[in-house]
Structure formats: C-alpha cells, structure tokens
Amino acid sequence: MQNKLRVTQFRGQQWYELWVRNIWRYPNRLLALKSAFTMGALLIPFVIFNLPFVGVTLALGALAGALSETDDHPKGRVKALLLSILSFIISSASVELLLPYPILFGIGLAGSTITFILIGGLGERYRGITFGALLVAIYTMLGAEIPLNWYTQVILLPTGALCYGLLSLTLLYLHPARLLEEQLADGFENLSLYMKEKSKLFPSQESIQKKTRQRLASLNVQMIGSLGRCKNVLNSYTDAVDDINQLRPYLYKFILLQSLHERAASSHDRYDLLSADSDNREILEGLGQLLLQLSLATHEVSKSLLMGTEYHHPISIKWTINAIKTHLNDIKQTTNKNDLGLLLQNLNQSHISLQNMNFNVDAGYLPRVDRDSSSLRKRFTNLLNWKHPRFKYAIRLSTCFLIGYFFMQVFDIEKRYWILLTSLFVCQPSYSETRLKIFQRILGTITGVIVGVSVVQILPTIGGQVVLLIIAAYFFFAWLKQNYAISVIFVTIFVIAAFNLIADKGVAVMIPRIIDTIIGALLAILVVRFMWPDWQYKQLPTLLATAIEKNKVYFNRILLEYDSPSKDDLPYRISRYQAHQADNSLALAWRGMKLEPKKHQKLQKRAFSITYLNHALLSYLSALGSHRNVKGYMNDEVRHMYKEVEEVLRMVADSLRKNNLQYSYSELNLILEKLGNKLELTERGIQRQKLVLLYNIAEVTKQLAQKASQIEEK
C-alpha cells in the first residue's frame, strides 16, 4: 500500500514538474491553454447535441474575452470582467437591434467606435475591454446572417467571455501574485536580451556598430515597455491590497530591474576607439564575456520568478571579474594605462546587485512607484482634442468602418462583415504600423487558407473539425504576442473549422474571406494615408525637443543626486524613465519613416543621425547616473562644467519649442577646449575616464544641437 502511494506521489510530482516546466513557465502558453480549454469545454457538448452554432458562438465569446483580459489584481480583475460582460452585451444588442435599419446602424457604428476607442485611451484596463466590445460587435454581425432570435448572440457571446473570465480568475485567485511575477519576469528577460546584444560591442569595429545599435534601440523599446507594464500592475496591486508590505519583494525587484537597465544602457566611451587599442582588446573581450554572464543571470532571475524557485547567483561571474581586475592591474603596471576601470566598476555593481537581490528586502524604506493621479474625467477630456493621436485614430477607424459598411450596402459581397473585422485589426494609429499589419494579415490569411484547406482534407469528420478548431485556437494565442502573421494563420484555420461545424462550408467561404481581407486592408491603409496623415518627418522637431528636454531633466536629477543623495529616488527614476520613453519615440519615428512613401522620407538620414546622437547622449547620462552613489566621484570644478553643459541642453530644448535656434556654442566650445587640455595632461586611469565621460556628454550635446538647427532650416 505504501509503495503504491509513493508511486502515485512520484507520478504526481512528475506531472507537476512537467506542468511547471512546459506551461506555467511560459505565460503565452498558459494563456493559450486557458483559452483552448474553455473553447473546447463550451464547444464539445453542443456539437454532441447537434447545436454547433451555439457552441461556436460561445467559443467566439471566449476568444473575445481572452483578447480583452486585463493585467489586474484579482479584485481589479473582477471589476474588469464585469465591465467586459456589460460592454459585450451592449455592443451585441446594439448590432442586433439596429442592423435592420442601415442608416441608424451606420450612425451607431461610427458613434460607438469613436466612444469605445476614446474610452480605451483612459488606460490599459479600458483598452482591452473596448477592443473586445468592438470585436464582439463584428462577431454579432457575422452571426446575424443565420436566422435566430435577436437575443441569441446577445446571450451566447458574453456568456462565452464570462466562462473564460471565471476560469482565468479562479487560477489567479489560486496564485494571486502571478501577474506581478509574469511582468517582472518579462522585464528581466528583455534586459537579458539587451545585455546579450550589447556584449557584441566588446570589442567591436565602427563598421558593425550601426547594426548593433539599431538592434539595441529596438530592444530598448521592448525594455521600457516592460517597465511600464510592471509599473501598471504594481499600481493595480497597491490599490487592492490591505498591507502594501506584501508587495515589498516585488517592489525591490522592480527597483533592481530599473537599476540594472540603467547600468546596461550606459556607455562610458566609444567602444570602437577603445577596441582600436591593442592593450584594451583582451580586456574588452573579457568585459563582453562578463556582460554575457550577467545576461544569463538575469535570464535565470526571469525563470525563477515564473517557476517559483529560488534564484542562485552564478559563482563564475565573480571569477570573471577577478580575472579582469588582475589583467587590468598587470596592464597598468607595465604600460601605466587603465581605460576600462570605470566600466568594470559599473558591471561589478550589477553583479553585486544581483548577488544580493534576496537580502534585506524585509527591512528599510518601501519604494514608491509612479502613477497617473489625474481623474478619469480629466483624462477623457484631454483625449477630446483634434491633435491627440487617440482622437485621430478613433475618427479614422470609424471612417474606415463607415466606408466599408457603405461598400457592403452597394455591392453584394459574400461574408461581407469580414471587411470590418480586417479593418479593426489592421487599422493602426500610424501609417507605418498599418502598413506592417496589412502585410502580416494578408500573408497570414492566404497561408492559413492553404494550410487549413489541406488539413481539412485529412480531418473531414465533425470530431476532426472540433480538434482542429481547438488546436488552432491554442496556437493562435501562443503566437499572438510573438508573431502576428503566424497567429493569423491559425485564426484562419480556426474560421475554416468553425464554418465547417456550422454549415459544412469552411472551405467554400475561404475565397470570400481572402477578398474581404484584401478590401478591408486596402480601406485601412487608404484612410490612414489620406486622413490626417502623421508623417514622421513632421513630428521629428517636436519629438527631438521632447527628447532633449527629458534628457535635460534626467541630467538635472543626476546632478542633484550627486549633490545630496535621496533615500527615496522616485523623482530620479521618473525622469530616467521619461528620458527613455522620449528616446524610444525618436527611434520609432525613424523606423516608421522607412515604411512611409518615398516623398515623405525627406529626413530619413538626418532622423537616423539624431536618433543615434540622442541615444548616445542618454547612454552617457546613464553612465553618469550609474555612479551617483560613489562618494567623491566629482570635484567642484567638474561639477561646475556639468552644470554648464546642462544649461546648454536646456537652451536647446527651449529653442526647439519656440522654433528659434539662435544661440551660441561659445560656452560649450570653451568647456570642450578646457576638457581637451585637461585630458592631455591627465594620465590614463579612473580620473581620466571620468573626464572622458564629461567630454563625450558635452560633445554629443553640441552635435545634437547642430543637427536640431539643420532640421529647423529644412
């Protein structure tokens, strides 16, 4: 009896470990499994009782519910679920009641689209809910072609969403901290990828740095996005828990993540110049290996958060640091040179922070997290502005729907509401995003049709179609956040299986689906192209002014920390985050410009130069910020020069805002000349590296100001 019990426990443990390693560790797979399980549980009983339409409609409701799910504390998730169900009922009922009256329906379609999109601009919670409501409205249009009572879909679609929501909520109540762990794990994983890419710069030549820098800029966009999502989830949990000390371990990990990112994003000198010195090359290779090891360590932190295991810091990192220190000392004794000591200090501090991440988290001050304190009413009022991107997007999407609906009324198009469904997914706030979505949507749809039709021939039975639908639903969600084009392939297969179950016409409706997809995609790109097109070259001066302004604030906060270190550095962290947000906006503008029509790519090369220089300035400022806790880092003379450079940054930002770039570089030139003379007289070591960092900040500030003036001249 005891042996049987042990065998049972052993097998249970094996299954648990399999679950943790293959599902629980991967949030996308967990979401996919929850969605597919709910759809299967709703679909199979009704297919057995020959009510496939009911089962498929419930499954579509579950799909919409999964897409509109929010990252909230369980208490907040309950409120969000209730709002979702209410909005789904209103959306579906409105379609059923107004669909027989084309004029009223068109007015309602445009008005509800604008309203939902604007409400979605209030925050992440509302964005998911309102997108789901629009999706349910179009699902209702698609199902309205089947003659049933008007309230059938009004009941079924929200019920499907409710079933998914209750399953997901139950799992969240069993492990309430799961969302915190997921978002923090995502942040550490993105940091790991950033560190891994940056290690390629040690050593490196100027010829390969451009590609690496571009890749780092993209990874930095992901990293800052992760920090923003972590902040939102932490605020949601802070509002819900009775004792905020419960969140102490997660708050400290969030602070650690920000600190590690600041150190990883920092640059102390030009790596191509350092690599050109043969004495530095071997040390740089060692630093590259150290950065790779730190990358693996942050990956392990991410893994431990998701799997619920304790993080063990690699001992090999300390060995690597000691080896580099020894080699640096040998070079200093033989050549009297030390160009990389400051950089090693920076990476060593990252090692120490990771090593001690689980110590002293139960004591000391409780870190604060930035939050938007403005009321919902004020946020909504701010959106009601013709210049606001969200308002423009709402008008564009509603116009897209109206044109598509008018087109459907004039021409007899089979399965015509797929035009609106495509426009909903493809139409994005910017031209470049829309163009990218079009390619992915059309490619995914055509590929899905080819693959789906082939698979249907292998699984022609009703049971085979049910299995195909559930598998397609799983892989749709598994790929949704990783590769949109691949996810479209699986949702197309999902549609084939669904129509086969309802009317045995899954293959027959695929040609209309392709045609409607192309029409909806063309409508989206034409509306975005000709209706308030926000070409990136027009946004560049404003984006640059914002970036320089935020860099200046970050610079100021760094110097304040050197003057009097603060225990609660929330203002410092806010300024740093906003500087990175502004830098990312520049990077995204340059990337978007490459997808715009040729005649609107006027400043592409200059945009790249500006993006590169601003990112370089931010990297140098990050290096300065990463040493702010080092006592005696700068003397009064150096501090005064930093203040002068900060003042120039302020002047450049103000001038860009006023479109008046009439200022002199004389003070900055004097600083650069003075620093150049000091550098010639200072032996190569830590003190010289500090002066080099100041020189680089001043030099890049000057170059950035000159580029800004050239943009205004255009």
Image (cartoon, rainbow, N blue to C red):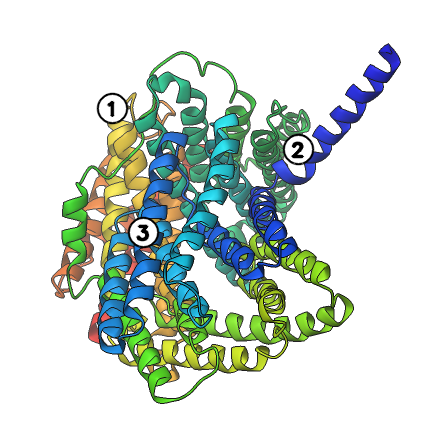
Q: Nearer the viewer, mark 3 or mark 1?
A: 3
User: Quick one: 365 or 250, which is closer to the camera?
Assistant: 250
Disc 3 from disc 2: Cα separation:
35 Å
- Residue found at x 58% / y 54%: 276
Residue highlighted by disc 1: 564
Disc 3 from disc 1: Cα separation:
51 Å
Instruction: Report x, y in % for residue 637.
Output: 25, 34
Q: Nearer the viewer, mark 3 or mark 2?
A: 3
| Quarter assignment of residue 626 | top left
Left-right relation of 15 to 32? right
In this rendering, is residue 191 above or below 297?
below
Left-right relation of 291 to 660? right
Q: Closer to the N terminus: mark 2 or mark 1?
A: 2
Question: How many numbered discs sit on the rendered protein?
Answer: 3
Q: Closer to the N terminus: mark 3 or mark 2?
A: 2
Identify the mark at residue 20; answer none if there is no mark. 2
Q: Residues within 10 Å of mark 2 (few under 14, many from 20)?
A: some
Q: Residues within 10 Å of mark 3 (few under 14, many from 20)?
A: many
Element type at marker 3?
helix
Q: Are marks 3 and 2 in contact (CB under 8 Å)?
A: no
Q: Report the quarter where the C terminus lies.
A: bottom left
Disc 2 from disc 1: Cα separation:
46 Å
Residue highlighted by disc 3: 87
User: Disc 1 marks which amino acid?
Assistant: Ser
User: Disc 2 marks which amino acid?
Assistant: Val
- Residue found at x 66% / y 58%: 466
Q: Residues within 10 Å of mark 1 (few under 14, many from 20)?
A: few
Instruction: Report x, y in % for residue 231.
Output: 36, 37
